[in-house]
Every structure is written in structure tokens, then in C-alpha cells.
Image (cartoon, rainbow, N blue to C red):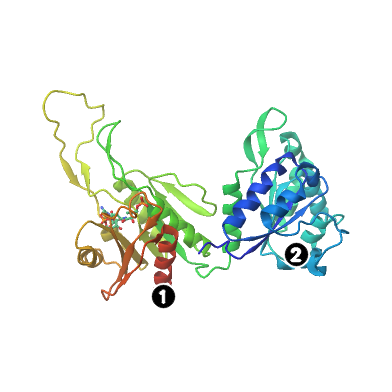
């Protein structure tokens, strides 16, 4: 289940031009199951209308300390108390300065002053205003007070210049909200190492032997573990975005993945290998591009290291089995041979799951050969089911 489901997010919008992006943030949060309360400053309400936000959130939008409210408890104290997290996006230099001084001359500042919930702030403004030592000092004051500051994006600014000061993409802001909500999750303090994607075994500087793994399964596991409070290292052959709070290590070949896994598992509680690791690599990688010639090209292939079998330690080992026949029998053989605690077997002949798909259909098998057959579900749901099983073992 998405960590945002049924959470109450208080979205504070201040009067920067990028306030026009705030309805998108509110809309995506709603689509992910969150309740969104909006507090806008007077200046923000000159850039976008409260009515837009009201329609998106299906809730009364708060703009004024003194506005008559239908529900008496919708004042700054109750807004501060009911939110699971407060997100100010965009945050102008003016609001940042007021918050840094503890001012409470509008509803947003009073609410923030009255809250004990985590506050995320996304400064967005002209680059000179951002880099002004006063603004920088105010931002670091708020950081010291525990505010989570989202680094402003780099790119085209209203002034026509290219610089730092843009409101980051909605996906990035939402990912940081997830990260903040994850604190105190049921896997808090646990350390997970996850692998994702298909390895690439070089033939020459241009070509490689690869496979169809997109990295979606591994990334879903990493994100689910992060959302549940774990410290996560993701060793991946594909670039995954966004990934706030996840330590990413980029690798390409089975050999590189093995080295990264060995280093990362030293203090880990669990290793989950969702990566599709090549079983063979070219014995002699050509330093130059192999020229086309008449006849057959022969490549001598040798085995890659078996990472799961060779990596040692007291952590929980979980593998995946990509099978096209005898799913459970073959998966049990791999579980035993590789000394795993659990294996998730997926039938890769199914068209609606497995490689590249957003969904998967797996059977989770444990050391007692007990098989839990899961129906087709999203990779995120599969991830949570695997994490539930790991939690039982931990
Ligand atoms: O990435 P996606 O597009 O989302 O697709 C997901 C997936 C289908 C790739 C994933 O769910 C999956 O099945 N991953 C494992 C694929 C695979 O390599 O299976 P295998 O049966 O060949 O290997 C068994 C286990 O040993 C795997 O955990 C694998 O990571 C590991 N292994 C394999 C070979 C090797 N040299 N070293 C290993 O550690």
C-alpha cells in the first residue's frame, strides 16, 4: 500500500511564480490516496485561485487567518495538529525569512509555528535572491530547527537566466514527502541491500550481452523498504528516479555487481537480489570494436560469479527465480543451492507480468518449502509481501 494513502498532507503555497505548479502537486497527492489541506498566502492567491485548489482537493482552501470557516476547528491549531506532514511548495524568500524569525502574521506561518509535525520546504525563487547570504542564513536556521529542505532545481528561471531556484518536479517533491513519512516505519533501523536490472557483459567497447530486466522489481523493493523506514542501498544497472534517501550504486556487469554487493552487505540485515544477473560472460573482451567479417563469429563464454551463492554473512538472503517451466521445483533447487532464506519465483512466460511489466505474479518459497502463491499484483505490492516475510524472519 502506498505510504501516502489516507495521510493528511498540509500543502502551504506561497507567492512565487512557481505556485502555478502547486495544483499538480495537490492533484498527484490526491491520486495517491492522500487528503490534502491547502493553506495559501495572500500573494499565492494572486497567482493561482483558491478555487482551483478547492476543486482538486475537494476541501476548503485556507487563505486568511480571519476568514469565516464552516468548521470551527479548521483554524491554524487544528490544521497543525491534523497534518501528518507539512509541505511548503513553493517557499518564497519572504516566507522563509518570516519562518526563520518565528513570525506568525499569516495563517501559514502561524500553522507552522504551532505544529509538531515534520515540515518540508521547497525554496523557489530568483537565483540572486536564493544566493543572498540572508536567504541562505534563514534556510540554514530552518534546517537546524529540523525542517527538511528540498534543494531548488537548476534550469530556466523567470528572469530568463539559467540558474538555481526552480521548484523541483512534482515526482521529486512527492518522493521526499514519502521519505519523511517513512520515518518510524515498521522496518526502521533495518538495513537492506537490493539489486535491480539486468547485467551487461561486454563483448567489445560497443556491444554487450544483456537481458530484458527493466529494474522495476528491484526498484519497487528498494522504494517499499525505504517507505517502511529501512536504510536502503540499491545496486542497479539501470538509472532509477526518484530515489530520495536511497543510496544508489551504479554497476554494469556481474563482476561489478558482486563487488558492490560484497561491500554493501557488511552491515546489512537483508540482501534481496531482484537483478537478472547474466550467467555467462565473454572470456576475452575485445579492446577494439570487432569488425564485420564473412562467416561465423564465435565468442567463448565463461561463467559469471554466482553472487548469491558466493556472498557470505549473517544477513537474510532473498533471491528471485525467473523460470519458464517447473516453477516451484526449479525455484526450490535454487533456494537450496544458493543457501537462501526465501525465493520469489516468477513465471516469465506470462505476458502480463515479469520482465518490464509494472505487475508481477510470484510464488514466495521458504526454507521449509512452503509456497505462498500470490495473484497478479503491482510490483510494489509484491515488494511489500516479500518485505512482510523478511520481517517475520528478522
Ligand atoms: O527488472 P524487471 O523488468 O522488473 O523484471 C523483474 C525480474 C523478472 C527480472 C525479477 O523479478 C527476477 O526474476 N529476477 C531474477 C532473474 C534471474 O536472474 O533469475 P535466475 O533464476 O537466473 O537467478 C536466481 C537468483 O540468483 C536471482 O536472485 C539472481 O539475482 C541470482 N544470481 C543469478 C546469477 C548469478 N550469476 N548471480 C546471482 O546472484
Query: Which image quadrant is residue 163 in?
Result: top right
Q: Quadrant of the C terminus?
A: bottom left
**In this orientation, which residue lies closer to the viewer: 309 or 172?**
172
Tell whether 278 sits left or right of 260: left
Question: Residue sitting at 30 percent across and 48 percent down?
Answer: 254
Q: Residue 313: where, in percent of width, then height?
A: 34, 65
Do we see residue 221 in this rendering?
A: no
Assess disc 1: are there few (<14), some (14-19) or many (≥20) residues with their C-alpha within 10 Å of its C-alpha: few
Question: Residue sitting at 26 percent across and 29 percent down?
Answer: 287
**In this orientation, which residue lies closer to the viewer: 269 or 209?**
209
Question: Mark 2 sits on what residue?
Answer: 80
Question: Residue sitting at 77 percent across and 59 percent down?
Answer: 112
> Looking at this rendering, what residue extends furthest in the left direction?
295
User: Is residue 131 positioned above or below 181 on the image?
Assistant: above
Do we see residue 113 in this rendering?
A: yes
Q: Residue 368: where, in percent of width, then height?
A: 27, 76
Tell whether 243 sits left or right of 203: right
The earlier-in-sequence mark between 2 and 1 is 2
**In this orientation, which residue lies closer to the viewer: 23 or 54?**
54
On residue 288, the disc is none
Find ligand 1 in the image and state its quadrant.
bottom left
On residue 392, the disc is 1
Q: Residue 77: where, in percent of width, then height?
A: 80, 67
Assess disc 2: are there few (<14), some (14-19) or many (≥20) residues with their C-alpha within 10 Å of its C-alpha: many
Question: Mark 2 vs ligand 1: CB under 8 Å?
Answer: no
Q: Residue 366: where, in percent of width, then height?
A: 30, 72
Tell whether 321 sits left or right of 90: left
* Element type at mark 1: helix
Tell whether 15 sits left or right of 243: right
**In this orientation, which residue lies closer to the viewer: 116 or 365?**
365
* Element type at mark 2: helix
Amino acid at each position: 500500500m502506498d505510504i501516502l494513502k489516507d495521510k493528511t498532507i498540509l500543502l502551504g503555497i506561497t507567492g512565487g511564480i512557481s505556485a502555478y505548479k502547486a495544483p499538480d502537486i495537490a492533484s498527484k497527492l490526491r491520486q495517491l490516496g492522500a487528503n490534502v489541506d491547502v493553506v495559501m498566502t495572500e500573494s499565492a492567491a494572486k497567482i493561482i485561485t483558491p478555487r482551483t485548489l478547492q476543486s482538486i482537493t475537494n476541501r476548503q482552501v485556507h487563505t486568511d487567518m480571519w476568514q469565516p470557516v464552516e468548521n470551527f476547528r479548521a483554524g491554524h491549531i487544528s490544521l497543525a495538529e491534523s497534518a501528518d506532514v507539512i509541505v511548503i511548495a513553493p517557499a518564497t524568500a519572504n516566507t522563509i525569512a518570516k519562518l526563520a524569525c518565528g513570525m506568525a502574521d499569516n495563517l501559514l506561518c502561524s500553522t507552522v509555528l504551532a505544529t509538531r509535525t515534520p515540515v518540508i520546504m521547497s525554496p523557489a525563487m530568483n537565483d540572486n535572491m536564493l544566493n543572498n547570504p540572508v536567504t541562505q542564513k534563514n534556510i540554514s536556521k530552518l534546517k537546524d530547527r529540523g525542517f527538511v529542505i528540498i534543494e531548488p532545481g537548476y534550469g530556466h528561471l523567470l528572469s530568463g537566466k539559467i540558474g538555481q531556484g526552480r521548484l523541483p518536479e512534482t515526482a521529486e517533491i512527492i518522493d521526499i514527502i514519502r521519505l519523511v513519512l517513512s520515518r518510524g516505519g515498521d522496518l526502521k533501523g533495518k538495513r537492506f541491500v537490493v539489486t535491480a536490472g539486468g547485467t551487461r557483459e561486454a563483448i567489445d567497447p560497443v556491444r554487450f550481452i544483456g537481458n530484458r530486466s527493466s529494474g522495476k522489481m528491484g526498484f519497487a523493493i528498494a522504494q517499499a523498504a525505504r517507505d517502511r523506514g529501512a536504510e536502503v542501498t540499491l545496486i542497479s544497472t539501470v538509472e532509477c528516479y526518484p530515489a530520495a534517501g536511497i543510496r544508489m550504486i551504479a554497476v554494469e556487469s556481474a563482476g561489478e555487481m558482486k563487488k558492490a554487493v560484497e561491500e554493501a552487505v557488511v552491515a546489512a540485515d537483508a540482501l534481496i537480489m531482484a537483478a537478472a544477473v547474466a550467467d555467462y560472460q565473454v572470456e576475452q573482451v575485445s579492446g577494439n570494436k570487432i569488425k564485420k567479417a564473412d562467416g561465423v563469429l564465435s565468442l567463448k563464454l565463461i561463467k559469471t560469479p554466482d553472487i548469491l551463492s558466493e556472498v557470505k554473512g549473517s544477513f537474510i538472503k532473498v533471491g528471485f527465480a525467473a523460470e519458464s517451466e517447473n516453477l516451484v521445483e526449479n525455484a526450490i533447487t535454487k533456494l537450496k543451492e544458493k543457501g537462501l532464506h526465501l525465493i520469489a519465483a516468477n513465471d516469465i512466460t506470462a505476458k502480463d507480468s515479469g520482465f518490464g511489466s509494472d505487475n508481477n505474479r510470484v510464488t514466495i518459497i521458504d526454507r521449509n518449502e512452503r509456497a505462498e502463491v500470490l495473484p497478479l499484483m503491482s510490483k510494489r505490492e509484491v515488494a511489500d509481501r516479500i518485505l512482510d516475510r523478511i520481517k517475520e524472519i528478522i
